[in-house]
Image (cartoon, grey):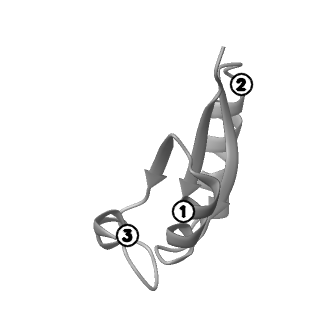
Amino acid sequence: MKIIKVLIVDDFAFMRKILTDIINSDYRMEVIATARDGKDPIGKTHKLKPNVVTLDIEMPKMNGLQAFKK
């Protein structure tokens, strides 16, 4: 079975931890990286090629909607 690779993007460490714990509790998914602002995941997405990216809407530097467009 193929593991679903997830990248979590949120500016709050607590939310990154909660989402990581929830996703990693399912054997079919794995959090491969996290990011704390909207600019950081752009390079990580190209390098790590996650299947799913969670994006917080309100973040510093670049919000989730702007990051989604890139």
Residue bearing mark 2: 25
Label 3 amino acid?
Ala
The image position of residue 2, as x and y in percent, is 64, 21
If the image is split into quadrants, where does the C terminus sit? Answer: bottom left
Q: Residue furthest top?
A: 1
The residue pinned by badge 1 equals: 46
Callout 2 touching callout 1 (CB < 8 Å): no
Upstream in sequence: badge 1 or badge 3: 1
Mark 2 surroundings: few (<14), some (14-19) or many (≥20) residues within 10 A = few
Circle 1 sits in a helix, a strand or a loop, which is it? helix
Q: Mark 1 or mark 3: which is in front?
A: 1
In whole angstroms, how far apart are the C-alphas of marks 3 and 2? Answer: 27 Å
Q: Which residue shows up at 44% across the image and 74% down it?
A: 59
Please tell me which of labels 3 and 2 falls first in the chain.
2
Q: Position of residue 12 (x, y in %)?
A: 59, 65
Residue at position x 49%, y 78% in the image: 39
Q: Nearer the viewer, mark 2 or mark 1?
A: 1
| Residue 54: numbered disc | none
In this rendering, would 20 be left or right of 52? right
Q: CA distance from mark 2 to mark 1?
A: 25 Å
To which quarter of the image does residue 65 belong?
bottom left
The mark nearer the N terminus, 2 or 1, is: 2
Counting from the top left corner in percent of width and height, residue 38 is at 46, 73
**In the image, what residue occupies the spot 42% across and 59% down?**
56
On the image, numbered disc 3 is attached to which residue? 67
Look at label 2 and name its amino acid: Ser
Q: Amino acid at mark 1?
A: His
